[in-house]
Structure formats: C-alpha cells, structure tokens
Image (cartoon, grey):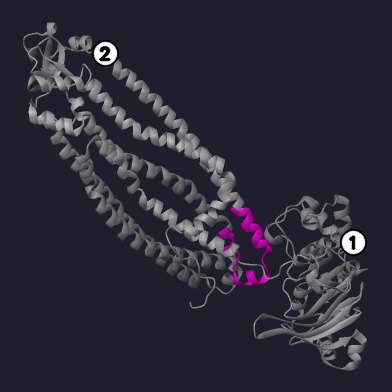
Amino acid sequence: MRGNPFIEDAPGGKLYDSTLVKRLLRYVRPHRKLIFLAMFFMLITAGVELLIPYLTKQGIDEYLAKLYQVYTAPREVCAELVALGDSTDFIPMEDGTTLLVRKAALDGMDPADRTRMLREGDLSSRTYYLFPGDRYDGRTGIVMGSYWMVPEDMLSSVPLSVILDVRGGDLRGVRRLAMLLGLLIIVSLVAGYGHVMTLVVAGQRSMYDVRVELFRHIQELSLRFYSKNPIGRLVTRVTNDIEALNEMFSAVLVNLVKDVILIVGTVVILFFLNVRLALISLAVTPVFILVTVIFRVKARGAYREVRKYLAKLNSRLSEDLSGIKIVQVFRQEKRRRLEYGETNENYFRANMRQLVIFGIFRPLIEIASSVGVALVLIYGGFDVLSGALTLGALVAFLSYVRQMFRPISDISQKYNIMQSAMAAAERIFTILDTKPEVVESPAAEYLRLSGAIEFDGVSFSYEKGNRVLSDITFTARPGERIALVGPTGAGKTSIINLLCRFYDVDEGCIRLDGTDIRRISLKSLREGIAVVLQDAFIFSRSIEDNIRLGLDLTREQVKRAADMVQATPFIERLPDGFDTVMAERGATLSTGQKQLICFARALAHDPRILVLDEATSNVDPATEKLIRNAIEVLMENRTSIVVAHRLSTVQKADRILVIDHGRILERGTHQELLAGRGIYYNLYLLQYRSGNGD
C-alpha cells in the first residue's frame, strides 16, 4: 500500500548500527558502575571457564597419567636434558646414556629443544608407569635402575593395594585438584550470579530511563502526530520495543564481550598447547563464516516477513475487537473470520519459512563444530599414540575446541535478538527525533488569565493547500458567552483546537488578555482553559480521581463540584460512591452520566475560559434539560465558548457566530440573527419543526 505511513514494522537497516548503539549507550552511561561491576564478574567467570580445561589437563598429566618414555642418546645430550627440567622430568640411569623422560615434560618443551632431542637420540613410543623397584612382583613390566616400569596398557595387572600405597601422593594431588576445581566452580557460580544480577539491574534501570523519556516525549508531541500514528502502535513502542532493547542489552551486548574473550582466549591457549592441532581445529572456520553469511541474508528476509504479517495480524485483531458491536449487528462474523484466517495463514507460513532457515542453519553449525572436534580427536589421537602429545593435553584441547565453537553455534539466537533490537531502536529514536510542532517560546510568560479572547485574521489548515479556517476574527470579553454554530465540517472544532494551542495558526494571531497566545506558557494556558468534549473521556480510576484529575482537592471540594452539576445523586447510587473504580472509558456509565462527571471535572479546575465542544450532542433531551443547569453554573463568571448543533443550548449566548466553510458568515445575538432571516434563521426553523427546538 503505497504512501501508507502506518506500515513500518518490517525491520530494516543494519544488523548492528553503531549510531543507534551510541545513542543507546547514553542511557547506559549513568549506570556505568553497575556495568563495570558486571564486566568484572564476567571476567571472573570467563577466566574460570578458560582455566578449568587446563587444570583438567594438569590433573591427568601430573597425577592420573604420570607416564614416562625411555630415551637413549649420547652422554652429553642426556646431561643437557637433565639440566633443562626438574628431577621428575628427566631421570638419568647409571650408564649416563639412558633417561626416563616424563611425557608431560616433552609436551611442554621448547620446540627447538624437542626437535634436537629427537634428532640426536632415540625415544621409545611405549609409555610406562613408575613404581619403586623393591615392589617388583616378577610378573608385570621390567626393572630399570631403581624403578619398576609397568607398561601403560598393563596397569590393571598391578594390585590395587600397591597402587594406593605407592601412588598416595598422586591421589592426594588429585584430591587437592578436585577441591580447587570445586572452589573455582563455586566462585564461578557466585560471579555468574553477580554478573546476571548487576547486568539485569543496569539494563532495567537503563530501559526505565528510555521508557520515561519516550513517554514524556510522546506527551509533548502535537495532535498532528497522533492523527498519523495509531495509539496501539505507540503503546507497542513504549512496551514491546523497549523490552526488545533490554533483551539485546542483557542477553547479547555484554555477553558478546564474554564470547569474544572466550574465543580469543581459547585460540591463544590452543596455540600455546599445540600449534599444529590449533591450526587443524581452525580449519572449519571458513565453513562457519560461509554458513553464517548465507544465514544472515536468508534470515533477514524471513524475519521481515514475520514482522510484517504479525503487524497485520495485530492490526486486524485490534480493529475487529474495537468494532465488535458493528461486526455482530451486521452479521460479519464469518467474513471477518475468513479475512483473519487468511492473514493468520500468511503469518503461519512466514513463521514456517523462518523455522526452516533456522532448522537448516543450526544443524550445519553443529556439523561444522563436530567436524572440528573430530579432526582434533583424529590427529590428536595419533599424536598421543606417537608420544608427541599427552592424554591430558588432548582432553583439554577437545574441551577448548567445543568451548570455542559454542558462542558461534548460538549466533542464530543472538542474530534474532539483535535484528529485533536494532529495528526497535530505530523505531523508538524515530519517535524521539520527531519534533513537536507546538513549542513553548523561551520568552513565554506565565499569566493568570482573566478570560479576554481575540481572534485576529486567523487562517489555518491541517494539510497544506486545504484551508479549514479563513480570516476568522472575533473577540470575547471576560465573562462573555460566545456560541459557534454551523454544519459539520464548518471549522468549529478547529477554532477550539487553536484556542487551546493544540495547533499553531498559519496566519493571523490569537490573543488572550491582549497577549499573543504563542508568548504564553503552555502551563498557564492549559490551567486557564477547561474543555468538555462531545466524547466524554473517563479514566479507569475512581470517580473522585476522575473529577480531581491530579489537583490537590479534598473530598468535600470534589463533592461540591459534583453537587453543582447535579452528578451526586447517580454517583451515590454506585456500589462505592465516589470511590467506585470505573471500567475502561467509563463503559458502565451512560453517556449523560459521563458528561456530568466531565462537567464536575471542569468546575473543580475552576478555569477562566470554558469550552463546551458539542457537550450535549450525544445526550437525550431529558438528560439535556437535567444538565442545562449544570452548564449555567459552569458558565457563571467565566468566558465561555460553546460549540453546538442544537440551537436550544446557545440561545442565551451573548454572541452567536455562524460558521460555514471555515468563514464567519453571520454574527449576533439569537434575536438579531432570527431577525436577519439568514442561515441561522433557516437552521432554527429546521430544528424547531423537527422538534429539537425549545
């Protein structure tokens, strides 16, 4: 639908827009201490996650798989190797040309020293556990020097009592390591809790600030903005879109830093452990990049379709529920069900397309990561068998590789959140960047109005080239009653909108007490004017709150206002009287009762200028006569502007302005206009003959 300003829910722009993120950080900055604390906790959890696999390696190599290999080389080479490590890494034999070399020591050697060692000597591939020579039972292994050497694959032949007795130090080491790991896990849990809590609190406070600013800005926007933006969509901006930002903040941005730390830290450790295996494990990275790029393109279109049809679905649902009476009266249930079903079907198909894309992407990522793990297992297994890599190093390598691929495999979820959040941020900032058309001048004055009104050559149009008011000129002295009559669309309500400064004039000037309305502060202007509209609006609060509406009034003052407009009798018949909480828009009250509450509200605010915009047009004649006294009470000692179709409500006006096509065609008192036998005279005869006159 070309040119429809309401269709805007399809996300566009970048996945990551640095400009939007910088603007969001403005709301995060006041809570930066919490963010830094969250980052501190995050660094602790990331450090523990990087440390645990390495400690596992140390436990296996130092205590569980404490293996040695036999190395033979010239005497000087063996002496140099003994000088390199400690007494448990290279154990010399009596002949000086044989060493028992600890396998874990080989894995940690400088590559150049290791290459020279293998070139100048012979290293056996078989690995042994060492026991004291005096415990040799003559059945398993061999004795070399003072050591009983048991092949790795024959350890089960050694009695358990011997293992527990001889390797007590290793078992104590395992227990110490287990306690250390347990302590680290507890630290990680505490830090993780602190990370989540501080991050959530900072996020909620930041989003609170965004929500408050957005709501305040929406309140300041001019009525023209609301004529172009559905209320339901604005509600979505203040709730759902801000929640999308909160989800991005708490689930993506800071955790993204953790993911980067884990990936970079893991890659560094992998290269530290074994350069060749690290390069092998990274061989599947191009596959990850390719799959991710393709997914991004496909998912973007699918996500846009889902959002588009969701917006249509919500719009149709809102419209049907709002107009349910009309739907039922004109028996349109079946047709509306079919239309809703068609939109629902499109939404279902769009969701299924998105699920298919995600269903393909996630397994591909899992397969790629599994291939990376398999390559490490295959090549690392050969290295373990050949003695080039320890078993603990292989186990740690596998843990690190899985840890490196995990953030990448979660990219689909993060992509969804980022896509939704960037679209939400764009829509939120579009509203925040919308400037109010009616702005208060820096030199605006606060005036206590006395009620003098002057329209001087006022012209106005809602859209350029389509004037609704032309050269409107009239005055009203304090306490005077001015009535505006004319056909629907003549421009009566537009005059009221300009008087309340919901819009600014295109030409001419409006003065209150001799001061240009644009030089009067909006606060004093709105305090001095009370409006009772044709559509009486009742808030979902108690009747007392609806009348008080923020003013510091006592119950007696509220009741006095209700008494003066004759609203007290029906209010006291309600279950809780003035404390009765109204249903949405006052649905449990009649139109006349709602109008009486609005009259009481206007009277309680004690304005100097009173505006009645078709305030009795929806009221039956009996109720109209009941509230006519209320109107008289309201108008007393106040400047009053009355807009009415029923001429019976304007006959006592000091001056009546007959308006048509945006111009004042006649003006005068009721009797003067009747004597003139013009437009007003014809309107009066028409209403009198139809029984709507006095």
- Residue shown at the point (47%, 35%) measured from the top left: 41
In the displayed orientation, state which residue is furthest to the front.
76
Which residue type does callout 1 highlight? Met
Q: CA distance from mark 2 to mark 1?
A: 96 Å
In the displayed orientation, state which residue is furthest to the top.
134
Q: Which residue is mark 2?
A: 169
Locate residue 641 relative to residue 30 in the image: left or right: right
Which secondary structure lies at badge 2?
A: helix
Using the rendered image of the protein, determine whether residue 626 is visible from the camera's viewpoint: no
x%, y% of residue 660? 76, 87
Using the rendered image of the protein, determine whether residue 302 is visible from the camera's viewpoint: yes
x%, y% of residue 4? 52, 75
Locate residue 372 relative to residue 452 in the image: left or right: left
- Dot 2 or dot 1: first in sequence order is 2
For the residue pair 459 and 665, the one nearer the viewer reads as 459
Which residue type does callout 2 highlight? Gly
In the displayed orientation, state which residue is furthest to the bottom.
677
- Residue shown at the point (33%, 21%) measured from the top left: 177
Locate residue 458 relative to residue 409 in the image: left or right: right
Q: Which residue is mark 1?
A: 564
